[in-house]
Amino acid sequence: MKAKTADRIATSILYLISGFIVLLLAVFIIYIIYRGMDSLNFDFLFGKPKMDQPGGGIGPQLFNSFYMLIVSLLITIPLGLGAGIYLSEYAGEGKFVNFIRLCIETMASLPSIVVGLFGLLVFVTLAGWKYSVLAGALSVSILNLPALTRVSENAIREASKKVKEASLGLGATKWQTIKNVTLPSAMPQILTGIILASGRIFGEAAAFLYTAGMSAPLFKFDKISILGMSSVDKISAYNLFRPAEILAVHIWKLNSEGIVPDASKIANGASAVLIIMVLIFNFGARILGNALYKSYSGK
């Protein structure tokens, strides 16, 4: 067989595999949205859930999902990005660095249910926070830190190869080079890691099941209390120590032990909302990341 013919066959096979994967993803998304399309209305998105009557909404769970995403990313991004900068720019070779990398690899292989049980033991029980936003955010951060650290490390190392010596040669300090040159160049790859972490936060159920709880008590947006531990403070929507059932846990609960007459319909609608949320966040993050990259690179 000629080399060109073999190359064409191999290329065609790769295109077919890629097309099949894209088609499978598109069918999956369309099917979920189609199943939940009947529930996508204002009352469903912003209404309160009902315990024993049909027609309940997912308003509290929807807000909890976004709030959990924000709190988790506020914890994960600084730690993951900082660890990536240290490992790529400052850490040398040695037993201590090898031990850090071993710990990162070990954390990356932990099942989410194990991390959830760890969060239940440490954050919920020992720390005395009970089921709370903070306990859930810290637990899912443990799951996301290894991946974001590795993505940041690889992105910064690859970006620094092109611009590091030129920047240092012009008289910039190492930190100025990292902050003003390397990080902007590595932004698309770092953003990919953040998107992957966000997707896991939206879709994770096992870790939140044991740390954030399976209930969504009513809260008020006009009351501001972030760190209060009393029952009055926990009425605030922004309180970090209140229980916060997210959308993924709500879907699991409806499908496993839902007692409302239209549990299946609510679960289908919530699944469609969850998929749409992930798509909107992914596209929005990509657009924002590209805009930041162009503003820094001058393109």
Image (cartoon, grey):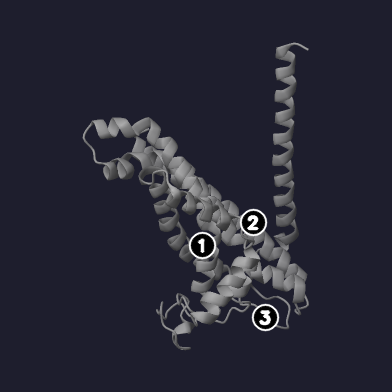
Residue 253 picture quarter = bottom right
Quadrant for the C terminus in the image: top left
Q: Position of residue 88 (x, y in %)?
A: 41, 43
Res. 275 mark: 2
Mark 2 and mark 3: span between their CA atoms? Answer: 23 Å
Mark 1 neighbour density, 10 Å: few (under 14) some (14–19) many (20 or more): many
Q: Which residue is pictured at 31% across the width and 31% down the height?
A: 165
Residue 74 picture quarter = bottom left
Quadrant for the N terminus in the image: top right
Closer to viewer: mark 3 or mark 1: 1
Mark 2 neighbour density, 10 Å: few (under 14) some (14–19) many (20 or more): some
Q: Earlier in the sequence, mark 2 or mark 3?
A: 3
Q: Earlier in the sequence, mark 3 or mark 1?
A: 3
Q: Are marks 2 and 3 in contact (CB under 8 Å)?
A: no
Closer to viewer: mark 2 or mark 3: 2
SS under mark 2 = helix
Q: Amino acid at mark 1?
A: Ser
User: Label 1: which residue?
Assistant: 141
Q: Earlier in the sequence, mark 1 or mark 2?
A: 1
User: Label 3: which residue?
Assistant: 50
Q: Amino acid at mark 2?
A: Ile
